[in-house]
Image (tube, rainbow, N blue to C red):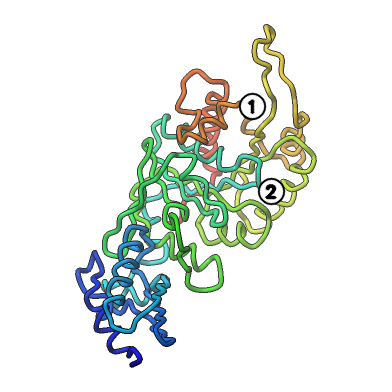
Amino acid sequence: MAVSEKEILDALRAVQEPELKQNIVDVGMVEDVEIAGPHIKVTVALTMASSPMKDRIKNEVKEALKGIAGVGEVKVVLTLMTSEQRARIFGQAPSEMEGMKGVRKAIAIASGKGGVGKTTLTVNLAIALSMQGQSVGILDADMHGPDIPIMLGIKERPVGSRGMLLPIEKYGLKIMSTGILAGQGDPIVWRGPLVNKAIKEFLGHVLWGNLDFLLVDLPPGTGDAPLTVSTVIPLNGVLIVTTPQKVALADVRRSIGLFRGHDVPIIGIVENMSFFRLPGSPDGEVMEIFGSGGGERIAKAFKLPLLGRIPLDPAIRAGGDTGRPVTLESDSEASDAFKEIASRLLIYCSRPSAREESS
């Protein structure tokens, strides 16, 4: 005898949404049930993308349905509720920028191409700003390559309250990343085909609290993804990361054109992997592996400040791999470079001409 949808829904009433303490059927989380003989597919809409909730609900749904006679394979597909669906459950839905209310300045870190050290700059600059008395958060908006959790050694999953997510805290920073949310296993399916819808949902449900700076690690390149993110988030400015070689500099020109074309202030250029200081050299001799002077030339060409030159230092790579960024060390040429960039960013942001946050 074929399994009925009523039997499935009745069994799923034994599964509770952990925060609401109500069953997932009556709350409206069961969006679809497909029956193909003994094979069952259930689509469940989560109130938030918190990974522990995801795993718990998924396992409980499978267990509940395996208790029905005649049920074979059970597949559970997870998606996210829309703001309207959450509003019906929790009351008034948060505005799309609710979590940003206490953020004084949002600064993007961008690059014309991948692999130039954009994420490395983001994490080390955040720590350097924190060391100078600033309250700092990091939003990892690179949805295709969310590496912030690796570079900061984050393994925890966020917790939520009434449809909002609390960022993870590490080294005095507040962090949120799609890498933290998705974790291992099946990906979370964002509703809607456009990146801007996903980012608005993301920002609207993260409780950043009061921050002096929110650093936003943008996707690399000059396509739709970085453009959408940079226009959806109310940015006060952008730092552009490059390396000295010609191919990277060509991409920087395109990136500058992209942001200037959409009225996003460009704070300055950071040249990464500028030089390698030869170990044991009595004169501090350096080798310019990727060429020299590229960052300075492009800064002059576009009348932008060169905010800093970061050395090619194995300690930077080691810090990113171990989850303890090099800026946490006090006696390093690399850490000093990041701290100098932080100081120059603070000077820029103190100028009357710097764009103020929206009221």
Residue 98 or residue 182, whichever sits in front:
182
Residue 31 or residue 302, whichever sits in front:
31
Of the residues under marks 1 and 2, which one precedes in the sequence? 2
Amino acid at pointer 2? Lys
| Residue 231 percent coordinates (x, y) | 56, 60
The residue pinned by badge 1 equals 311
| Residue 114 percent coordinates (x, y) | 66, 47
| Residue 136 percent coordinates (x, y) | 41, 41
Residue at the location (30% across, 79% down)? 28
Residue at the location (33% across, 58% down)? 52
On the rendered image, what quadrant is the N terminus found in?
bottom left
Q: How many marks?
A: 2
Cα distance between the residues tagged 1 and 2: 19 Å
Near mark 2 (Cα within 10 A), the count class, few <14, some 14-19 or many ≥20, is many
- Decide if residue 292 is on the left or right side of residue 262: right
The residue pinned by badge 2 equals 113
Residue at the location (71% across, 18% down)? 286
| Residue 61 percent coordinates (x, y) | 31, 72
Amino acid at pointer 1? Pro
- Label 1 residue SS: loop
On the rendered image, what quadrant is the C terminus found in?
bottom left
The reply to whether discs 1 and 2 touch (Cβ–Cβ < 8 Å) is no
